[in-house]
Amino acid sequence: MLVFEGREGLSESWEFTNRLHSLCASQTVVVVVVFTLASSSSGYQNLVCLKHNVNIIPPSNKRFDCSGFRGQSSEQAITDLADLLRQENRGEDLRNLLTQLRPFFSLIPKAKTAKIVRSIIDTIAKIPGTTELQISLCKDMVQWTRAEKRTFLRQRVEARLAALLLESKEYSEALTLLSSLIKEVRRLDDKLLLVDIDLLESKLHFSLRNLPKAKASLTAARTAANSIYVPPAQQGTIDLQSGILHAEEKDYKTAYSYFFEAFEAFNALEDSRAVFSLKYMLLCKIMVSQADDVAGIISSKAGLRYVGPELDAMKAVADAHSKRSLKLFETALRDYKAQLEEDPIVHRHLSSLYETLLEQNLCRLIEPFSRVEIAHIAELIELPVDHVEKKLSQLILDKKFAGTLDQGAGCLIIFEDLKTDAIYPATLETISNMGKVVDSLYVRSAKIMA
């Protein structure tokens, strides 16, 4: 690892370039050069040299202390340079760095190459708004790994590409990629990668609303995970997906236990997904009508670490559910739109909860009446008239109560529940039993006569 420091204009001199070439000709090195500019706007230039290839990354107007690079290996220098570019949100430069390092990769072990490539891709992922850049980079790296016959690295880059396609909602392309990849990995029996791919496939099928296949893929991931050591973060991901699938089947108690396991794993690792696991735990409590427990969970030692908009949103929903107030419920949905409606898992369950609350409130309001104006019900429940009318017609069709809508008069007419006389079913049962007795006697008499 070589570090140079100099003044502005040094990089443009032939003498400096020749010195670098002579240094790089004798050995394979990575050179990072830091220039302190003489002008008022200080900055730096980073230069990565591989053999005789000199590639200059354009300077920025930020200053960087390169003292930490001294005496480090080329791998560490690349990692530090990648971190530096990430701090300045220079995604394209990171992509160019990975491309320029390809000749260097042919001179180091394949395992170290895989580590550097995956590290740089992970570094780019930390820069906001680079999903398209990551997809393009992964596709380029897949082509390069195929040409270089680096199967181990290619499979992992393809798995990362499938995850990015899933995030971008390119479901068909992601499914095609995973289908071919999973067959290849099963032949090689790479259990750890197989767990990742099965989990991705489960998430993909869940996004496509294919729950049977999502459960089958999750079961396959669990089966593969049982035969190897799975890192805590990966185990937390499995538990989180299990909770999501159980919640989709309305088994909220089992889902809560899975979300709790995922929360403990992510909390111990200080993973950002811990807050989402906690959020889904609170959702399960609300869905099983235990909204009073939400405040206690949030105020616990673990919950206080994650106080913020996500938990505030669930607390507002829990308060609305406890008070059976549709107005408070709609206020919570409006105030915390990003946390509730833009989260597809929470939004799906809260939509169901809203419909249940609306039904309960309407049935409670119309119970004292035999005939009531729809506008009066809408005023009592504080909702638009057309919304209330539509929901009442749905309740009548679902036979939640007996009645009819008089749209001309704008009224709801509720019929009295006619009590079924128990004598008629009892009579029919008696006649049925008598028929069986007669049939039995006929069979016996036929045997005697024979």
Image: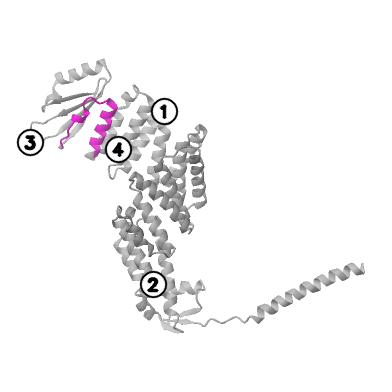
The local secondary structure at tag 2 comes to helix
For the magenta stretch, what is the residue range? 62-86
Q: CA distance from mark 4 to mark 3?
A: 31 Å
Q: Is residue 73 magenta?
A: yes
Q: Position of residue 147 (x, y in %)?
A: 40, 27
Marks 2 and 3, the one that precedes in the sequence: 3
Q: Main secondary structure of the magenta part?
A: helix
Marks 4 and 1, the one that precedes in the sequence: 4
Q: Position of residue 20 (x, y in %)?
A: 20, 20
> Is residue 279 in view from this perspective?
yes
Foreground tag (1 vs 2)? 1
Which residue matches tag 1? 150
Which residue matches tag 3? 40
> Is residue 348 in view from this perspective?
no
The local secondary structure at tag 4 comes to helix
Q: Are marks 3 and 1 in contact (CB under 8 Å)?
A: no
Return the mark for residue 334: none
Return the mark for residue 123: 4
Marks 1 and 2, the one that precedes in the sequence: 1
Residue type indicated by callout 2: His
User: Where, quadrant-wise, is the N terminus in this rendering?
Assistant: top left
The local secondary structure at tag 3 comes to loop
Q: Residue at x 41, y 69 (%)?
A: 357
How crowded is the residue under tag 1: few (<14 C-alpha within 10 Å), some, or many (20+)? some
Residue type indicated by callout 4: Thr
Which residue matches tag 2? 387
Marks 3 and 1, the one that precedes in the sequence: 3
